[in-house]
Amino acid sequence: MNRDTREVPLILLGLGNIGGTLLRQILETRATVAERTGLRLVPIAAADVSGLLYAAEGLPEATLTAALEATQDGGTLAALVGQRLLPGARPLADLPTVLQPGAILADLTASPKTAPTLHAALAAGCGVVLANKIPLAGPWDEAAPLLAHPRLRYEVTVGAGLPVIQTLHDLRDTGDAITLIEGCVSGTLGYLCAELERGVPYSQAVAQARALGYTEPDPRDDLSGKDVARKALILARTAGWPLEEHHLTVEPLCSEALAGLSIEAFMAAAATLDAAYAARVAAAQTQGNVLRYIARVTPEGSAVGLTAVERDGPLGALRGPANYIALHTARYQPLPLALSGPGAGREVTAAGVLSDILELARRMSNV
């Protein structure tokens, strides 16, 4: 290892779709990252709801590989931790004891219960990187200290790997005034809309998105519109507008009648919505339009829902899981500053988290 290489201890919360992919990327690129950045990423802890793996000097690669195998396909660390099959297996309650100054904790969960751990990590001198949107989309008084903290980054909470959050910060830091944010911020629902436009039935499009890893394990977490609503709140708050959930109107893309079903029962019943969504697609097409799931955010509030847009416009031209976000400002008008690119997918999202980790590590070392 180069004498100038600095080790960066990592604590990973969650080894699901994003967490597992991130850990694989860290292991596969560690040598390249160290050579290019002078930073060697060392996972010292990995945790999920069932337990914790920890080694102060860094978890052995064999342990990390076993953890990846145990958590693939929706599994947990339970067997490894509960049976103490690996060195460093501990109960989850020990997590606060592994926090240390200079470490970076990545919240890769979709849990509403991680906020106390995030605050504890920051108080202990850790950096924090979020893929989890929930801590930033709760009540303003709880989210504000996280949003303003200099050792917290959250780029992938909106737009996966697109530099939306950093661009908003740059605009505000240079004295620009943001007036409107609008666009498609869900790669999952963008994919669904594009498939509906192609004539694919709603139920089949949902099943395809799930199989491709675009949706949460329960697709209704995406179809409810709550995920987009959280992104809208994060965008608003990053723009300087302290909106609350009640300032948003949200149109779901699934029936409330299907909310209480198991995941598999919902997937089977989704065909009951095929005709309704086919009719909406046809109605838009008669006007020369297509349907897109759009968030429109202003200082007064946000509207999130299925909207007919011009087929040849920037939103209508989107295909697959692409995102498009237009930032209207005092300077960027009449044409907005627009960002577009993949808005879903394990690889690009995990890579965005990795980029946040590296940027935060540089800031924390003042290099």
Image (spheres, helix red, strand yellow):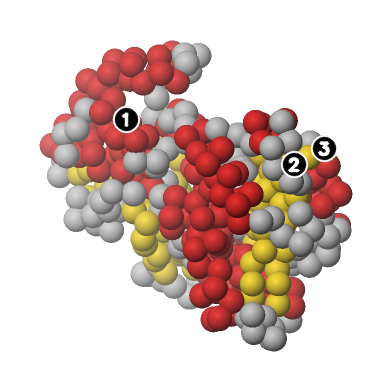
Measure the alpha-carbon separation of dots 2 and 1: 36 Å
Q: Nearer the viewer, mark 2 or mark 1?
A: 2
Measure the alpha-carbon separation of dots 3 and 1: 37 Å
Among the 4 quarters of the image, the one containing residue 359: bottom right
Name the residue at 75% across, 50% down.
54
Mark 1 Cα shell of 10 Å, populated few (<14), some (14-19), many (≥20): some
Mark 2 Cα shell of 10 Å, populated few (<14), some (14-19), many (≥20): many
Q: Residue type at mark 1: give it.
A: Ala
Q: At which x and y percent is residue 71? A: 55, 38
**172 or 136: which is nearer to us?**
136
Name the residue at 50% across, 51% down.
21
Q: At which x and y percent is residue 280? A: 24, 29
Q: Nearer the viewer, mark 3 or mark 1?
A: 3
Name the residue at 26% across, 51% down.
319
The answer to which of marks 3 and 1 sits earlier in the sequence is 3
Q: In this view, does 110 lie to the left or right of 100?
A: left
Q: What element carries label 1?
A: helix
Label 1, on which residue? 207
Q: Which of marks 2 and 3 is in front?
A: 2
Label 3, on which residue? 93
Label 2, on which residue? 89
Labels 2 and 3 touching (C-beta < 8 A) = no
Q: Residue type at mark 3: give it.
A: Ala
